[in-house]
Amino acid sequence: MAEETETINVTIQPVKVTEDEKIEFYKSFLSNKAYTGTEYLFDKQFNITFKSLTVKETMAVFDQLRKDQLSNYINTDSNYMMALTNYRLGIAIVTMNDEDFQPDITKEDYKPANGDDSYIKARAEIFNDWPAFKLGALAEAFRTFEDKVVYLTKEIHTPDFWKAGQ
């Protein structure tokens, strides 16, 4: 008996970047600073600005995840993935609708409550009270931003891509 197979057509959407985004990425690269970009929701009625994470911030996220595992705060794969998303999102958001996002919770100023706590966890705490669809929309906007960062990084070696920025 012949086995039926199903074909799934997966179309990868091309990443769209503007000339301004190319220029800002190039400037960030040269100045050794985080790349920032703004994503728009609701037909540009809501905006959210993200920044790329530094290596130290990325390591701090994974350190917090490890603390959470050791304290049994994270005990399933789904909890791990949710915390990873929330921690990265909490660090990456710069502004929402042109208002600073959690300006009082910074690495420099935050005082951990205990050994399992950090500014990473504190910045993500706000998401626990949001409706899941709102968090999902912001996570999707962050994914779009990160897709641009990955695309721009891959295009560093493509000479014709950068002609407009010269």
Image: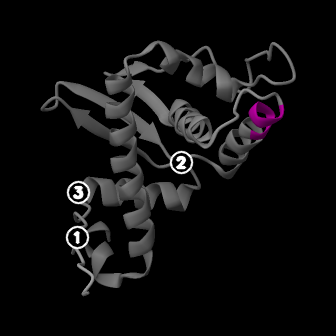
Q: CA distance from mark 2 to mark 1?
A: 37 Å
Left or right? Give the position of 82 relative to 56.
left
Going by the numbered disc 3, the residue's amino acid type is Thr
The percent position of residue 147, horizontal first and vertical second, equals 37, 57
Q: Secondary structure at mark 3?
A: loop
**Which span is picked out in magenta?**
66-70
Q: Are marks 2 and 1 in contact (CB under 8 Å)?
A: no
Q: Earlier in the sequence, mark 3 or mark 1?
A: 1
- Give me the residue at 43% from left, 38% from top: 50
Q: Is residue 17 above or below residue 87?
A: below
Q: Within 10 angstroms of label 2, few (less than 14), some, or many (20 or more) residues?
A: some
Element carrying mark 2: loop
Q: Of callouts 3 and 2, which one flags the residue occurring earlier in the amino acid sequence? A: 3
- Mark 1 lies on residue: 8
Q: Residues within 10 Å of mark 3 (few under 14, many from 20)?
A: few
Give the vertical position of 161 relative to 106 (above or below).
Answer: below
Query: x and y percent of residue 144 in the render?
Result: 33, 49
Residue drawn at x 67%, y 52% is: 55
Q: Is most of the magenta stretch helix, strand or loop?
A: helix
Disc 1 on helix, strand or loop?
A: loop
- Tell me whether the residue at label 3 lies in contact with that at label 2, contact meaning CB atoms closer than 8 angstroms: no
Q: Position of residue 42 (x, y in %)?
A: 16, 29
Q: Nearer the viewer, residue 166 or 103?
A: 103
Q: Which quadrant of the view contains residue 23? A: bottom left
Q: Pointer 3: what residue?
A: 18
Q: CA distance from mark 3 to mark 1?
A: 31 Å
Q: Which residue is mark 2?
A: 34
Mark-to-mark CA distance, 3 and 2 = 18 Å
Which kind of residue does numbered mark 1 sit on? Ile
In this rendering, the answer to whether 93 lies above or below 154 is: above
Q: Quadrant of the N terminus?
A: bottom left
Q: Position of residue 64 (x, y in %)?
A: 74, 35
